[in-house]
Structure formats: C-alpha cells, structure tokens
C-alpha cells in the first residue's frame, strides 16, 4: 500500500510537470508568432505565420486564440495577394478558422469582427456582384459583435473601413466614415489586454485612415 501511494504521488508529480511543460511550450510558441506579427510585411511572411498558428490551433482544441490568429493572418495574406483568382481560397482558410474559433468560444466579439473582415476582403474581387452576398455578412457580424462588446474598437474600425470604401452614391465615403473612425480612436485609448494573446491590433491602420479622411 505504501508503494502504491508513492507510485500515485510520483505519477501525479510527473503529470503535473508534463502539463506545465506543455503550457510553457504553448506560451513560447504563441509568443514567438505574436512577435513575428509585429514585423511581418510580405505575403510570404504572413503565410508562414498563419501556418504556425494553424499548427498550434490543431493541437490546442480548447483555446480560441490560436484559431483567431490563424484566421487573422490568412486575411492579411490575402490583402497582399495580387492574383484575384487566389484570394477566395485563402479567405476560405480564414473562415474555416473563424468557425472553429466560434465553436470553442461562441459569443466572441473578436471572432465576429474577423468574420466581417474576411467578408469585406472578398468584395474587391468583384464588388458589383458580391455586395449582395457579403454586405449582409459584414453588417450582421459587426452588429452581433457590438451586442457582445460595444467597447471593442475593432468593430468600429472595420465598420468605418467598410463605409470608407463604399461609394458616396451608395451612402459611403470619407466624410461618413470619419466619425466612426474617431469613435474607434477613443475606444483604442481605453483598450486593455487582460489575458495573453488577446487581439490588440488596429491602431496603426486606424491612424492611416483618419489621415486619409482629413485630406
């Protein structure tokens, strides 16, 4: 009996150490890719990052953040892809990871922002024929995100970008987008990350669009 207790205790210690090691591996891998996000410029760099997050997401089925960042990175890949006929396949991967993330974390405003962002990225492929399909996805996703967390600045950033690129004749343009960009700007000032690997992107993108609106 004494030997059994010793064995059980030893096994618990080994399992505990293994779990700590796995947790550290996860954090180290995520941190490395998170650092790469800040430096990435080219399509190839973003593709490497997206594939890295994919691998982590594949082994971390209870964490939504790797799926989120895999989707985000694929969206950034497609923004740098010049061949229009290749964009949809990349965005299909982004959408796949958004949906996987939403299965883990159903009421997640950040993932819903990515859903809108992905739909928005499909519009330039053929704006006239795609607006009827993807316009409602953008609007519905952002409204759902706002109901969950109306203080998320990325909701207003993507919403304002959508208006910015919409022709004036259809209710868009710089003048209408600017107040929403400014709303996002105020919310970014109060943005806090309470946990590791939470979304915090957008401020540089926002500053660029505000500058363009004021020209």
Image: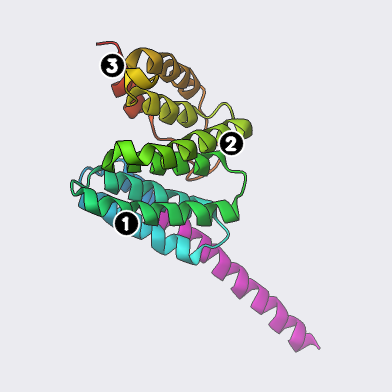
Secondary element type, mark 1: helix
Residue 103 lies in the magenta-colored region: no
Q: Pointer 3: what residue?
A: 211
**Callout 2–callout 3 Cβ contact below 8 Å:** no
The residue tagged 1 is: 89
Mark 3 Cα shell of 10 Å, populated few (<14), some (14-19), many (≥20) = few
Q: Is residue 58 left or right of residue 161?
A: right
Label 2, on which residue? 144
**Image quarter (top left, top right, bottom left or bottom right) of the N terminus:** bottom right
In the current view of this chain or complex, which residue is farthest to the right? 1
What's the CA distance linking mark 2 and mark 3? Answer: 29 Å
Q: Residue at x 49, y 30 (%)?
A: 155
Q: Quadrant of the C terminus?
A: top left
Q: Look at 47% across and 45% down and name the residue there.
A: 197
- In the image, 40: left or right of 17? left
Mark found first going from the N terminus, 2 or 1: 1
Q: Is residue 151 above or below residue 83?
A: above
Toward the viewer: 22 or 39? 39
Q: Nearer the viewer, mark 2 or mark 3?
A: 2
Q: Is residue 209 above or below residue 124?
A: above
Magenta segment: 1-30
Q: Residues within 10 Å of mark 2 (few under 14, many from 20)?
A: some
Of the residues under marks 3 and 1, which one precedes in the sequence?
A: 1
- Decide which of 175, 19 is in the foreground and name it: 175
Looking at this view, is 144 or 52 the one in front? Answer: 144
């Amino acid at each position: 009996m004494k030997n059994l207790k010793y064995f059980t205790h030893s096994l618990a210690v080994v399992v505990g150490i293994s779990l700590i090691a796995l947790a550290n591996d996860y954090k180290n891998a995520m941190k490395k890719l998170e650092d790469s996000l800040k430096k990435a410029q080219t399509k190839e760099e973003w593709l490497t990052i997206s594939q890295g997050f994919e691998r982590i997401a594949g082994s971390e089925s209870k964490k939504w953040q790797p799926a989120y960042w895999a989707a985000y990175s694929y969206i950034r890949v497609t923004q740098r892809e010049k061949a229009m006929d290749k964009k949809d396949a990349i965005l299909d991967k982004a959408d796949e990871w958004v949906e996987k993330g939403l299965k883990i974390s159903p009421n997640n405003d950040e993932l819903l922002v990515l859903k809108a962002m992905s739909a928005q990225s499909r519009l330039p492929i053929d704006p006239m024929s795609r607006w009827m399909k993807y316009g409602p996805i953008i609007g519905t996703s952002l409204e759902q995100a706002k109901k969950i967390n109306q203080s998320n600045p990325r909701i207003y950033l993507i919403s304002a970008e959508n208006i910015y690129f919409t022709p004036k004749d259809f209710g868009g343009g710089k003048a209408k987008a600017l107040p929403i960009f400014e709303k996002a700007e105020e919310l970014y000032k109060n943005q806090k990350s309470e946990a590791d690997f939470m979304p915090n992107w957008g401020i540089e993108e926002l500053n660029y669009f505000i500058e363009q609106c004021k020209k």
